[in-house]
Image: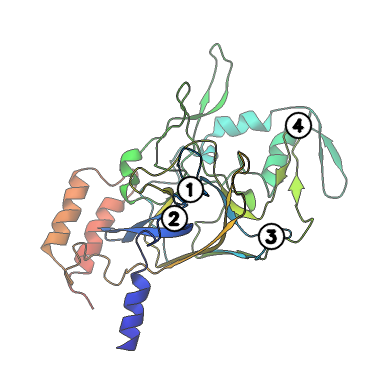
Amino acid sequence: MMIESLLALLVAQSGPPADPDAVAMWIDDLGRLTPFGRTFDVYIQTGFDPEFSYPNGDPRRPYMIGSTRGNESPSRSFGWAIEGPIFKNHNDATYPWLDNCQECIEYYENYTTFDDWVLPDGTVIPCSEPGTYWDCIQANPYQRTRYLGAKFTPVNWQFEPGGTSGCCPRQVDLVGLEYAWCDSWILHGPLGKKYGKSNPQYKYPLVQQQHKDLMDTPVLKYWLPQPVGYKPAQRCCGNPSQIDFGDLIRWNADVDWESDKWPGSFHIARFTGPDYFSSGGVVRFACGNGHPCEPSPYSVNYYPDNSCPSDLNEDGMVGYEDLLRVLSDVAGFKYHPQTNNGFNAIIKVLAEWGECN
């Protein structure tokens, strides 16, 4: 009985914080949308405390999550853990990542610029040599853009030759948004939303190359507070230095990306499938405008109830209602056609048919 009560408590840790002004990371459990495990959204709430929010009353926008650094007190380490398989409703092999845009890669491999790339052993390679810029980007652990393997957020690349503006790789409009209902992404607000009035653009969560595996389960990220004076950085050719601020994810705090569904909170991730999600550390905010800039501690632990994943209506058994729901999703083309997800969903329901244990 005690174990059952404990498990019930653990799996129930979802929903917005009781205090609407508290800074917290929290879980919005969307339920069993597929037979591949629960789908849940991750939010950061910053609240409406008038002494902490913007002058117009808007909540402070998160800038980073990570550890404390220097003399910040109390000091906080950082942790990020995911266990269990993550379901993706897209195909990594065909999705328009930079990895899958060969013309984009060839362009950057021949790209030249000014300045030098200084290797750790002191070797100096001129950035006027083709390949130097690209090699430096791929070797920089603190790089936040244009590195291969960034498959945690939907940045769509396309090579556009010719035209009045020349030719080069470009980030283009997102594709496959209709499949995001059960997909898994690290987010910068609602998927597909653009920010700005005169020239609306997407904003993406920025993750250092050394942490690009933050969704490759099982994953455990953990580090201690950064000591005073410790700020590792590398610079590639003429680019600004890429600096490790003890952060895992950075967002653009200059745009209003507050959630419409949950005012006072900001949507940072959607996951389908994992059996455990945990994170703890501090939320950082952009400084300036006379507002408090101290980091705020947070901690979240969530155990989704994946005990009977094919029981979509959660009535204690896998039966006809669950099968009809999956068949309806398949017929409605809600599973990505470049995957076997629809077929696998049908097979999984049939394989788990009957009463749940």
Position of residue 354 in the picture relative to residue 3 (left or right): left
Mark number, residue 21: 2
**In the structure shown, which secondary structural element does the residue marked by tag 2 occupy?**
loop
Tell me which residue sits at (69%, 60%) in the image: 72
Circle 4 Cα neighbour tier, 10 Å, few/some/many (<14 / 14–19 / ≥20) = few
Circle 3 Cα neighbour tier, 10 Å, few/some/many (<14 / 14–19 / ≥20) = some
Mark number, residue 50: 1
Q: Which kind of residue does numbered mark 3 sit on?
A: Glu
Query: Which residue is tagged 4?
Result: 238
Cα separation between marks 3 and 1: 23 Å
Position of residue 184 in the picture relative to residue 136 (left or right): left
Tell me which residue sits at (66%, 55%) in the image: 246
Q: Which kind of residue does numbered mark 4 sit on?
A: Gly
Report how many numbered discs are placed on residues in the image: 4
At which x and y percent is residue 190? 39, 42
Which of the marked residues, 1 or 4, is nearer the chain's N terminus? 1
Query: Which residue is tagged 3?
Result: 72
Which of the marked residues, 2 or 1, is nearer the chain's N terminus? 2
Cα separation between marks 2 and 1: 9 Å
Circle 1 Cα neighbour tier, 10 Å, few/some/many (<14 / 14–19 / ≥20) = few
At which x and y percent is residue 272? 36, 57
Which quarter of the figure is the N terminus placed in? bottom left
Question: Closer to us: mark 4 or mark 3?
Answer: 3
Mark 4 near mark 3, Cβ–Cβ under 8 Å?
A: no
Position of residue 331 in the picture relative to residue 223 (left or right): left
